Each structure stands twice: as C-alpha cells, then as structure tokens.
Image (spheres, coloured by chain):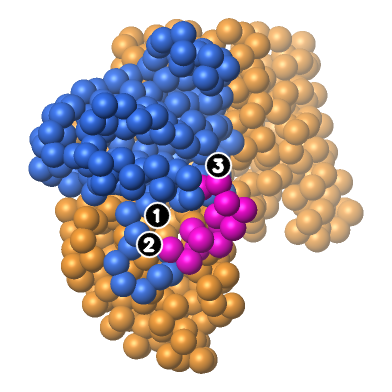
Chain colours: A orange, B blue
Amino acid sequence: MSDMGSPTFNVRYDENNQEFSIIGSMRPRQVDEMDGCTRLLTASIALVKGTFYVNVKRLLRLNNLAFHTLATHLVKACEERPELRISIVTSSVVGWSTRKFRALQEANPRIAVEEYDSEFYPGQSFLEEGCFIPILRTQTKMTWRHERDILPRHGMRKGLAIADICCGIGDFAVLVHKEFDPSRLVALDHSQSSLDYARKVAGDFGIQGIEYVYGDAADMLLEDNQFDLVTCRHSLQIFDRPELILRELYRICKPGGRVYVTNEKNSHCLGEPRAESIQWTYTEVARLFAHFGMDVELGPKSRRYLLDAGFDDVRMESFMVTNMDGDPQDFADIIQSWENVYAGQMSVQRGDDETFNARLRQGFQDHIFAATHPKGYAGWPIWVASGRKPQ
Amino acid sequence: MSQADVTRVGRCFAPLLSIDLDIAAFASNWSYCDRLSSYFARMISHDRTDSLLYANLFSSAFNELLETVFRVHGVAGNLACRVSRQADRDRIELTVPCGESEIAFYQDAIAGLAGEDIEDRYRAALFKEGPMEASVGLLELAVDYGADLSIEVMPKAIRLVAELSLEGGRN
C-alpha cells in the first residue's frame, strides 16, 4: 500500500486490488500541486496487469484542472499500453462524479465507469420490500415505548446535533424530533425508496427540520466530528462487516459525544406456552440470517464492538418488547410479518425443504399463539449499547 | 431585487445569502474559492430533498464560477456573491469588477454557450493538451449542470448570473 497526502486530499494505491483511490477535495490552482498524486498514479499504472481500478467514491470535490490532469494521465496510459483496461468506480451519492468521469469513457473505450450504487447491501433487500413498511412502523412504535426512557441514559437530551444512520423509513427520527427537539437532525439511509417514504411521512405530518440523506453507512460523506449523538438501530446486525459502520459512526461523532446502537439476539425471542417450538424457530432464524451474511445474534456483542472501535464509557442494557406493551395484536402482526419474510422468502431462497419450512413456520405461529393467549407471554429482547468518543 | 430583475427572469427569487469582499483580498488566496463555495453550499442546502447531495453539487458548480472569477477579474473593486431561490431553482449572481479585456472575455464566453456543439466543445476543452481555457468552468455549468448563464455589463464590472436546478442530482 502506498500513500500520498495533501491538506485536502489523499491518494493511495493498493497493489493487491490494483486500486488507486482518491479521497477528499481536489481543487488545485496549478498542475504542480498534483505532482505527488500524478507520480503515484504513473508508478501504480506501471505495476498493473489487466485492469487498473480508480476508486473515486469518496472524492467529494474535483475542479476542472484536477480532472484534466487525471484524464490526461489515464488516457495516455491506455494509448501507450493496448492491453490495459481502466475501471473508474464512482458513487451516486456524490452527485457529479459519474457524469464527469463518463467523459473518459467516451475518450477511450478501454476506460469504463461503474457507479457503485444502491446495491450496497443486496442481502437486505428482503427487509426493504414495500409490504414490510407497516411492520417496521409498528416495531418502532413498540420499541419507542422503552427507548424514549432509555435514550437519556445514553446521552440524549434536548438541543443536540443528532445523526440517525440507517434510518430506514425515518420513523425513529420523527419520534426523536418530536420528543427531544434536536438542533440538527440528519437521517441517512442507503435505500432511496425508504427515504422517499420518510420524506412523504414527514411532509404529511408537517415536520420540518429532518435532513433525509442518501448514503452508504460504511462510507459516508458526512464530515468528521459533527454530531453530539449518533444513533444506529437494528442495523449493525444486518451488515456483514459491522466494524466498518462503527468506524464511520465514530468518525462523524464529536469528541465527547456518544454513539448509540441497538441490536437483537434473535435466538432469545421467547414465549409461553409452546416455548420449545418458539425457541427452535428463532434459533433457526439466527442461522438463516447467518447464511445471508447477517448476525442477528449481535446484541450482547455490542460492548465488545464498541470497545474495539475505540469508544470509552460504554453503557449497556437490554429491554424486552412483549405482548403486554399495548395491543397484543400489534406484536402478533410483527411476528406474522417475520414469518412471511423469514420463512416465506429467505428460507425458500436458501433452498430449505418443506418439512423444515413447515416447522419454522410453526414456531412463529406458536409465538403468535403465546402473544394473543389471555394468559400467555411473548417477548422480543433488544440490547442497547452506547459508547463515548474520547475527547 | 429590482423590478427589472423580476421582469427579466419572469419570476421572483428570494434572497438567501450574500457576501461582498474586496476583489484583491479574494484574489490573494486560491482557497477562498473552495471555502466560499463550500460555505454557501452548506448554508443553502439544509432544506433541500437530500441536503448532502445538494450541497455537493452546488459547491461544485459555484466553485467553478468562483475559480473563473479568480482567474479573470479587474484590478480593483468589490466582488459581490449573492444566492437567491425560487422553488427548485437557485440563482447565483456574481458582480465582478472588470476592465475592458475581462468584459470581452465574459461576453465571448457566454456567447459561446449558445452553439449546438457546446457539449463537444466542452469535452474538447477537457482533453485539450496544454493549459486549460479559463472558460471551461462556464462550459461545464451549461453542459453538466444544465445552468442558464447570462451576463449584464455594468460600469467597470459585469454581473454574471447562473440559474440552476439541482434537485434530484445530476448523475
């Protein structure tokens, strides 16, 4: 790995991936301000066999002089080495970059521009279907009963600058906005359809002041040290590399601010009567998610993740959403939606046989039975953890 | 905004933010282009559909205008930067002190945006060998950002106006 820095941008070359990355803002006045960059670019291209990757996903700003300089070197490299291919990886989040770099594609057919887009986390598509939205709203309604009281123990108070990362349909951000009147509230998600829904809901309810922004939680364009409190709920557990998200949550949090995460341990969902069937199903649900690269057992591991990410003053607690929180039918509806997605889609996609699938479904139905039984009890445990970014 | 402004553009733009500074002070430090464009972008984008995306696009467009002014301006006077808004459309006005040669540059550059081959000329400028043309930023605004650009010649100054609709992103 080779690095070359300037006050506003960094360039690096990763030999293993043949990837040249430019990060930051590149707006030079004169060409010689890019000498370090172009030297590393030339040296990197000389080492490449096959395809040379140019990663500009986090290149936020680029003026025409810098583009001209980069373009000249890349086109020249293609002209001098007929076997060379160049793949430029842009991000739709940046806005200008795909269109700008496509000019290179037109200049030389061996230069391709690929936009790294909404397929950030394809495994999660199960959870982003339109039919799942009402259930997400019900889930937030049920967890909010607990979190409204829990949040102040983790640094929440009125008037903070807050970011809700992986905000989904934005309902938690709306509740935070109403209850805690933040000075700034940014809600970020990688799903445009979820953000569209969030904006519509905010508009319908006349809520102003929530900035819904599109972005990749593992590679955000938000600046460093901006927020007093960063929340990320039920999301580390559905990313295959949660440490990358935590690194970004840490980066955007102000020193002395806190990062708040919630996660489940699905195998600990419980109910009476029919406890054994329920427990079997949720243990299998955890295995099912693991098959798709998601760890829905992450909840109790949150403390370790936060400490490993560099946080101190880690605080942790858990709460149980149950059928006794309001209307039991709400909880039953949530369980039914889990069955529809987990047994109806994910299990089928994994290739499970009918016998297994029927048993998986039975556990959900037994959980519903427990939730709606006049003497029954059904629970869904959630772990809350927060850590302080050192001053 | 004068009645003439309203009539000329056919709609009323509400002022959002303005800064006046001495042109010599502006031209003393290249990083002012980046700082001003980033500051304006952050301040005016918070209530756009996607504030982060909008700020990024606005900063990129505004910076190209400021870099053009940095390279082509008169020796004395005030640079006035004003941003105003009408619904989805933002209007940037830069009043730039200019001598005769600078006025001629801006007049030629804006007149050159009218041709049908503007996209080809922009691409050619981007890949041209040797120093870049000072007008490439204006070409970029017209081609990549769909901006409507115009100028008004004033005594010893020009007013450069760019109107943009950046909601929804440009990619």
Determine the secondary structure under disc 3. loop
Residue position for label 2: A67
Pick whichever, B3 or A277, lies toward us. B3
* A143 relative position to A130: left or right: left
Mark 1 neighbour class, 10 Å CA radius: few under 14, some 14 to 19, many 20 or more: many
Q: Residue at x 26, y 60 (%)?
A: A10
Quadrant assignment for the C terminus of chain A: top left
As shown in the figure, which amino acid type bears the numbered disc 2? Phe
Q: Nearer the viewer, mark 2 or mark 3?
A: 3
Asked if residue B88 is positioned above or below residue B36 in the image, the reply reads: above
The tag earlier along the polypeptide, 1 or 3, is: 1
- Give the amino acid at mark 1: Val
C-alpha span from label 1 to label 3: 14 Å
Inter-mark Cα distance, 1 to 2? 12 Å
Say whether residue A118 is left or right of residue A224. right
Disc number for residue A271:
none
Using the image, determine if residue A25 lies above or below residue B83.
Answer: below
Image mark for residue B136? 1
Residue A106 at x, y = what percent?
Answer: 57, 70
